[in-house]
Amino acid sequence: MNLRLAGRPSGVARRDGPARRLCRGAALALALAVAGCAAIDPPPAQVSVAPAAAPRPAASPLAAERKRLLDAFGGEYHAPATEAFLNGVLARLAPAPEASAQPYRVTLLNSPVVNAFALPSGDIFMTRGLLALADDTSEIAAVMAHEIAHVTAKHAAQRAEFEKTAALFTRVNAQVLDRTQPPDEAEARSKLSIARFSRQQELDADQIGIRDIARSGYDPYGAARFLTALGEWSALRAATSGAGNADRPDMMATHPSTPERIAQAVAEARKFSPPGTGQAGRDAYLSAIDGIAFGDDPSQGVVRGTTFIHPKLGFAFEAPDGFTLENQPAALVGVGEGGSEALRLDSMALPDSTPVATAIASGWIEGAKTRSVETMQIDGLEAATAVAEGDQWSFRLGAIRLNGRLYRLIFAAHTLSPAVDARFRAALESFRLINAADSAQAEPQLLRVVAASDVDTPETMAARMSFLPRPLDQFLILNGMERGAALTAGRRYKLVAK
């Protein structure tokens, strides 16, 4: 299947020569709105500090926004050589007329999600997932210039007004209509508001950004090429991952890409030069990103097909066949059967004196009655299971004690038939202490740049990353190639390697 936006405008050659994703189980956030605050990873241990001589000043709004971004996107990712290269690109963009006098600097985010943001403080945030998708310097310059344009055009201030309106709506819901917003949904909306711009704001930022990169000597068509790749990558992710990710929205959720937007980017680029005349800087860019991490960070847990492995916490788990999983900051979530089945895995502290059976009977699902509590052992660990019934969803609950934490597995289905329940129980009983095979599966994945030989084809290259879902599609999109295109001997291409 060729994953591309239909009707590519003329002038946008493929780079060889991520439709907005919504959770298919729309009720997933409500179905899995568990009581209490939990996450897969335990919170960091508290440390004692001496009392300060004077109160610390309150964090500025920009500092709070920076922290929010880091928390939402896996923290900071350190790659000094890559950062130096990107800061060099920024320095070249700085003299452009619309660029701010404030010097910008890059902060890399440890997330495979494709996204970027800029703050008026001069911070530009880029995920390592975005670096992997971009194919040359002009494309990454286009992303930077676009984000700076959002700041210089004061789109952030306009977005702040939107957030005030959203907050007012929430208060009206809660105080006037007596409809409280579920905490998970409120947090998801907060994270998504990080950079949701209007259609006109996106077009304005495109126009300013393309003008800036053209005046800085970069290929102005890089913006359209990246937008095209973004649409293809997001379509691939939507096809291979049914679980929504409101905690870490990808760029298609916050910066929608459409054929119309791509066509306008091409039209803007034509004002400066014909295709193929600007500096793309592909080799320099590929050298700068060679060796960066790709995909999930093993220290935060990894998804491998229907298997979730957390080397740091020492456990693994098999989701039911047909489920797609996504590892979010607060929990592992999964969707199966077109959204009619779902799961959530998280953890919470549990005192040694509290039996697991007592914990599972405490009422995890708001508005659902828990029954049929059963104690058990899973891989030698104290565990329990139960059933809960809600208005629209039925649940198979599982709880396992491991290293002072209670791991909570919640499976949801519209109808908990004996066959469905048997699948859920089998998945629950797959929870295990990590073994050598799991550790091997969870090895870090890296983006590598390799030169094609005379006999290489896209298929032989993709075979070297066969551990990924749909490796040929991933290879083609990462390298900006159309299906059926041939490789050029000696030309360098991106691969994912262990």
Image: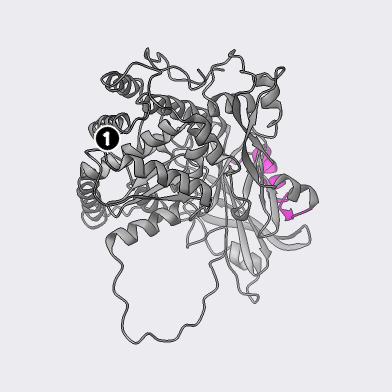
What is the basis of the colouring in this image?
one colour
The quadrant of the picture occupied by the N terminus is top right
- Residue 498 is inside the magenta segment: no
The residue that label 1 is drawn on is 205
Image side of residue 181 versus residue 438, left or right: left
Image side of residue 67 versus residue 483, left or right: left
Whether residue 391 is visible here, answered yes or no, is no
Image side of residue 71 versus residue 40, left or right: left
Q: Residue at x 60, y 23 (%)?
A: 491
* Magenta span of residues: 416-435
Identify which residue, 154 or 308, lies in the foreground.
Answer: 154
Image side of residue 239 versus residue 268, left or right: right
User: Can you say whether 374 is above or below 82 in the image?
Assistant: below
Q: Position of residue 95 (x, y in %)?
A: 27, 41
Identify which residue, 2 or 383, lies in the foreground.
Answer: 2
- Residue 423 is inside the magenta segment: yes
Q: Residue at x 37, y 14 (%)?
A: 9
Mark 1 nearby-residue class (10 Å; few <14, some 14–19, many ≥20): many
Q: Position of residue 419 (x, y in %)?
A: 68, 37
Q: Position of residue 129 (x, y in %)?
A: 51, 40
